[in-house]
Image (cartoon, grey):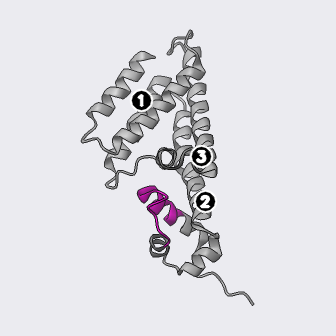
Amino acid sequence: MARPKQFDPDRAVEQAMDVFWRKGYASTTPQDLVDALGIGKGSLYNAFGSKHALFELALRRYRDSQAEALIAMLEQSGPVKERLREALVLLVEMDLADPDRRGCMGVNTAAELGGTDAVATELVRRMFDRTEEAFAALVEKGQRAGEIDPGRDARAVGSLLLNIVVGLRLMARVAEGPERLSRTVDALLDSL
């Protein structure tokens, strides 16, 4: 008879996500994961196969929890520019309040593994594509409501918004305060 697992795999992925998010893929050792998950190396490899397989699960968990939360915020009702401002300000505030200054796990992964790890690159690319699509859809709503210039290319503005978010999340990792980030948000919204 098989021995029951001594840990909750779902919780383990959540804990691993935190370690990878804080340290990055390359800097996270199997021992870091064992310590965070409270299991032995054998159990780690039996449950997940490899460090990379666990990283993939953690990155997917990040996408499903953190990245989708931004999209859900963008899809709420109300004036478009207010929703954009609220979403961007919330990201800045969360990043600056985080004592580890982790930023965005997707952005961090793109910087660390983009182009060198096919699976991670594709996961992040899909995450960014989905976010960009949500921004473009929001811009189209703003255009229909008369809040955003209807002559603007909604997809191009969606790309711009995604790039602003990537930049904000990266800058927040080293910012001394919110001033520069707030100026960026204000300038972006004024340009729409």
Sequence-wise, which precedes: disc 2 or disc 3? 2
Residue 145 position (above or below residue 69): above
* Residue 101: in magenta span: no
Q: Main secondary structure of the magenta part?
A: helix
Which amino acid type is shown beneath numbered disc 3? Thr
Q: CA distance from mark 2 to mark 3?
A: 14 Å
The residue that mark 3 highlights is: 121
Q: Residue at x 47, y 68 (%)?
A: 29
Question: Can see residue 79?
Answer: no
The residue that mark 1 highlights is: 85
* Dot 3: element: helix
Q: Residue at x 63, y 41 (%)?
A: 126
Q: Please provide the residue range marked out in magenta.
A: 14-30
User: In the figure, residue 133 lies in which quadrant?
Assistant: top right
Residue 42 position in % (x across, y down): 59, 81
Name the outermost residue toward the top: 151
Mark 3 or mark 1, whichever is nearer to me: 3
The one of 86 and 37 positioned closer to us in this rendering = 37
Q: CA distance from mark 2 to mark 1?
A: 31 Å
User: In the figure, residue 56 lies in which quadrant?
Assistant: bottom right
The one of 119 and 132 positioned closer to us in this rendering = 119
User: In the figure, residue 183 lies in which quadrant?
Assistant: top left
The residue that mark 2 highlights is: 57
